[in-house]
Image: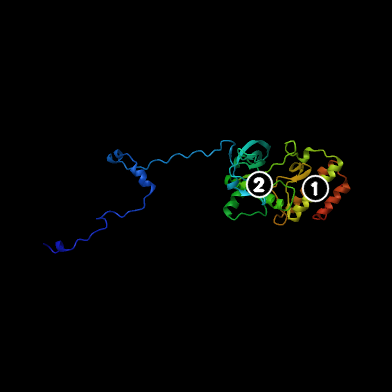
């Protein structure tokens, strides 16, 4: 016997049964494979996973998105439905615009009396959207990534999508801020992507609250609405903000109360170098409407003097 034959045999861990390993779902799949596939030399394949069931409510168009959205200011209004079992149903289009469309949505819990109406403001996709003069409005707003800043400046498809998200976020933030201050704005319910859900402002007969431009108020009523407008502008100015696109078409009269709407382009009076120009234009447009509908000059001037923001503001003729 040679010297090598007398050497002890080194045992390997593979000589005995392999160490047990944690069982996985793949093992179960392999055991269920037809043995014929193995004998034919084909590699066993795991059994296909079952197709997911469509998670669609029996009634309505979708489940409530409350659980995945950014919420408005707390405490939440009592009329708001926050139950996760609620469903949203589309009831039609309220308003169409260049940047966004507003839809009427009913959020309700099936089988109960819990229900509320919401205005769903949905900013359009890049290829169907036209933001006008947005470069001036965006002065003072910054994003962290230079790539995103360049994309928005060049108006690429990616940049326009970023702008849509920025408009929606700006409006939601402004509405939340003003709501907390008691400003006359609809309650901002939630923000999810580029969809902003708002309190739906309707009249006792169920119709949507009319725009100021649609009305021809009596003299006493006109003066009352003017005072409400000055009060609202004072809240904005005290917060260093201007509406940026204020007009009789962006003012609603909801059950006797003047309401500010459409604030995606809200302007920071400090950060935006054109902030005071936007404010002056806002004031000029609404003042012209009120005086053109019979508001006495002395009442208009008394209201403007309360703003105390533009020293050389010309008197109303």
Dot 1 corresponds to which residue? 228
Residue 198 point in image, percent of width and height: 67, 44
Image quadrant of residue 8? bottom left
Disc 1, SS: helix
Left or right, residue 178 beside residue 300: left
Q: Mark 2 falls on what kind of element? A: strand
Label 1 CA crowd tier, 10 Å (few <14, some 14–19, many 20+): some
Colour option used: rainbow
Decide which of tag 2 and tag 1 comes sooner along the chain: 2
Q: Residue at x 69, y 41 (%)?
A: 200
Q: Position of residue 100 (x, y in %)?
A: 65, 41
- For the point 66% across and 36% down, the residue is 93
Residue 32 bears which disc, if any?
A: none
> Of the residues tagged 2 and 1, which is closer to the observer?
2
| Residue 306 falls left or right of residue 39 | right
Disc ID at residue 189: 2
Horizontal side, residue 192 vs residue 181: left or right: left
Q: Position of residue 220 (x, y in %)?
A: 86, 43
Q: Is residue 120 above or below residue 276?
A: above
The foreground one among 140 and 23 is 23
Left or right? Give the position of 253 relative to 196: right
């Amino acid at each position: 016997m040679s010297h090598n034959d007398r050497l002890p045999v080194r045992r390997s861990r593979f000589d005995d049964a392999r160490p047990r390993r944690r069982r996985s779902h793949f093992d179960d799949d392999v055991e269920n494979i037809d043995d014929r596939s193995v004998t034919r030399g084909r590699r066993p394949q795991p059994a296909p996973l079952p197709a997911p069931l469509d998670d669609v409510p029996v009634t309505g168009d979708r489940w409530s998105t409350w659980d995945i959205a950014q919420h408005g200011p707390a405490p939440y209004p009592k009329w708001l439905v926050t139950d996760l079992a609620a469903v949203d149903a589309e009831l039609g289009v309220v308003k169409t615009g260049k940047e966004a469309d507003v839809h009427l949505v009913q959020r309700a819990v099936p089988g109960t009396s819990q229900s509320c109406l919401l205005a769903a403001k949905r900013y359009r996709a890049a290829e169907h959207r036209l933001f006008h003069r947005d470069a001036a409005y965006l002065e003072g707003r910054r994003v962290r990534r230079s790539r995103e800043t360049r994309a928005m400046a060049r108006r690429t498809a990616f940049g326009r999508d970023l702008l849509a998200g920025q408009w929606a976020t700006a409006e939601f933030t402004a509405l939340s801020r003003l709501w907390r201050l008691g400003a006359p704005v609809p309650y901002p319910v939630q923000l999810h992507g580029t969809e902003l859900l708002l309190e739906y402002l309707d009249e006792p007969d169920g119709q949507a609250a009319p725009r100021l431009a649609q009305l021809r108020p009596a003299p006493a009523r006109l003066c009352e609405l003017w005072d409400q407008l000055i009060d609202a502008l004072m809240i904005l100015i005290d917060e260093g903000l201007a509406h940026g696109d204020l007009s009789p078409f962006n003012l609603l009269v909801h059950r006797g109360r003047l309401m500010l709407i459409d604030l995606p382009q809200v302007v920071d009076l400090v950060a935006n170098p054109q902030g005071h120009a936007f404010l002056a234009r806002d004031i000029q447009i609404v003042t012209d409407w009120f005086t053109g509908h019979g508001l006495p000059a002395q009442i208009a001037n008394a209201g403007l003097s309360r703003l105390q923001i533009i020293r050389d503001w010309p008197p109303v003729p």
